[in-house]
Image (cartoon, coloured by chain):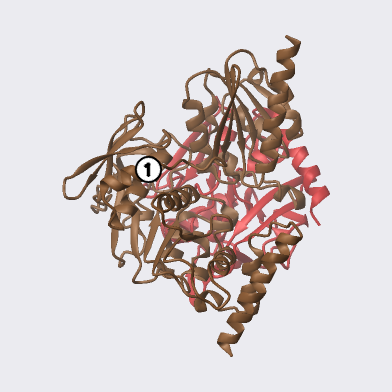
Amino acid sequence: MKRIEVLFPDFCNIYGEAYNIEYLRRCAPEQLEIIRTDNHTEPAFVHSDVDMIYLGATTERKQEQIINILRPYKERIRELIEGDVIFLVTGNALEIFGCYIRDGEREIEALGLFDFYAERYMDRDRHNSQMIGTYNGLAMLGHKSQFSFAYGDFDDCFIEVQKGIGMNPKTMREGIHVHNFFATYSLGPFLILNPYFTKELLARLGLEERLCFEKEAIEAYEYRLAELKRTMK
Amino acid sequence: MKRLRFYLALWAAKLSIIALKITRHNGTNFPGIVALKICPDFLWQVKKPARVIGITGTNGKTTVCNLAIDMFKADGIAVLNNSLGSNIHTGLATSFVLGTGIFGGLKYDTAVLEMDERSAPLTFPAIKPDWLLINNLTRDSIMRNGHPEYIARILTEEMPSATKLLLNGDDLIASSIAPDNERKYFGIKSLDTDVTDCINLVNDLRICPRCSSLLKYTQRRYHHIGKAYCPTCGFKSPQCDYEGQNADLEQMTIEIAERDGSVFCYRLLNDSVFNIYNVVAIVALFRELCYSRERIAELLQKIEIVKSRFDVKELGDFRIIKQMSKDRNSLGTSRAFDYVSGRPGDKELILMMNNLSDSRHWSENVCWLYDADFEFLNRENIKNIVVTGPRAKDYYLRLKMAGIDDSRISFAEHELDAPGKLKLAGKTDIYILYGTDSITLCNQVAARIENEIRERGERA
């Protein structure tokens, strides 16, 4: 039995995120135990082994609360990352793992596990875009909708973007991939949008690479990929 | 100089209306764009009616606004409104261009304006409603609105201090807006369909906004709409000044109790919970405008919900029902699904809530499909669901995830081919669920369904 910890599902459910782990569960229902940790409970990863941790996009206010909740466990998180535990972090949750988030005059100290910072632009229109990129030979798709961008070198990026933007409009490097830590600004049901990556994730979990509704998921993915290639400049 | 610029803007915008008519263009925003281009403070300078009523919120503001306009009309009062234009600053400017004479005089004493909640920073500094009705604040298109917390913050920051608020007390996000403003609350005491646990995927207020404890809902209509309290800090739903009770969906009536203990019965216009709220909101608004209960009840007898949002046509054994279901809006879609699936009798559905403009320049963000309760469509009396348009394959997958069997899903790549996939087996209601930019396409699909019914009838 593999254990997946979903951190703060009451906070991090901004846009279809809940279906990431629900989809994984349906891919291997007999082999996955899902632990849902709320904001008043000590995360399971602190004192026990988990195979995967999921943290999804959230509101700006709750993002700051999550930083404060996770701060005492910063070194444990570092240990887990270095110990090859799988992390999937989507949307603005990735900013939690950087050095700080700047919001106007305010600077919000983040966990500092990776060398980048984020800047919020709350007074501008929200950034919306789509993305086609590659990871490990796989064509990756993503939806972005955010008030902030991240800045840094991103030598360990997750996805090399071909169409769209990376961590900010001036880079095609998207997300973070270190050991089994995967973070992306793409939000929503990232695993449903990227069925081939989900297969890889299942393999990394030591599970059979068989998807729930595999045929339909791949057909929908292929259609979106072709549509984006055709329509996106 | 400033005033001269205003008049130039007004005249140019009025000329643009004539030009649009001659060239048979729609362009409901265009005159406002012209006015604001020439005179950026046009909305500040233009005369406002003595009474300005704003209506905002995530879902249903167009319906509430139309109902309010129709109530005034039934009362013999013409009001300045933006029902033909958009609800952002350019649409409002267009309305004022239309409602203002060439010398700047105003033709109306009252304005009823649908005001986009996201555009508050552009509209509220210039147009300060005397009353602002907020019917709900829920998750909407993430691309434009982000999340309800963000919209609530914008509204609170931008709210004119003198504006009196009329808030949905059963929505703890909407009812917490601009706490320093004078306010009244409306709500529904209880409905037979109330639950306590959330059965929806989306619940935008699980956590107490004050202390982050888990909120307890004593009654829940759907999502975060209902009555709740925080067991830790005491944060709770406000007491309503106008509260619906004893809704009778057979007689289509509802009683509305007021703070003074008086209770009066009004007509319901539609049996969906959304529209019950809309009626309570309208009664509350007109009571605050000093209309008598009897007069409001009389006026409610004379109005209907605008047909572009919900339209029924009977054809033999079949009823073709056009049901707007806002694309990219999971909560609106869930409400439509809940309503449709709860209707008695066999049904076939055509799902075409595709955002057509998005699919022209990229692929529509499909995240909202996983916030929308497609699970509501997994009911025995929904015999066939035709998925169609650019997102058809995404709908197909989502319906499968909702537990719906292949035998009850049909696929048509193009919307106009969808009627050919209907089973039309016996007495059936056929629902077309369409998005905000596919009204014309929906009408074409409806016409094809009629043809399909006739042709199959002739063949039989």
Q: Nearer the viewer, residue B271 or B223?
A: B271
- The residue lying at 72 percent from left, 24 percent from top is B451
Q: Is residue A40 above or below residue B155?
A: above
* Marked residue chain, label 1: B
- The residue lying at 26 percent from left, 47 percent from top is B293
Q: Where residue B13 appears, x then y in whole percent?
A: 65, 71
Q: Chain A is drawn in which colour?
A: red
Q: Colour of chain B?
A: brown
The C terminus of chain B: image quadrant = top right
Q: Where residue B365 appears, x then y in whole percent?
A: 65, 47
Mark 1, residue position: B300
The N terminus of chain B: image quadrant = bottom right
Q: Quadrant of residue B29?
A: bottom right
Q: Can residue A86 be seen in this view?
A: yes
Q: Is residue B16 above or below residue A233?
A: below
Q: Where residue A121 appears, x then y in whole percent?
A: 57, 69
| Left or right: B432 as drawn, with respect to A221 | left
- View extreme (left): residue: B261
| Left or right: A66 as drawn, with respect to B38 | left
The mark total stands at 1
Q: Nearer the viewer, residue B304 or B76?
A: B76
For badge 1, the amino acid type reads: Leu
- The residue lying at 71 percent from left, 50 percent from top is B357
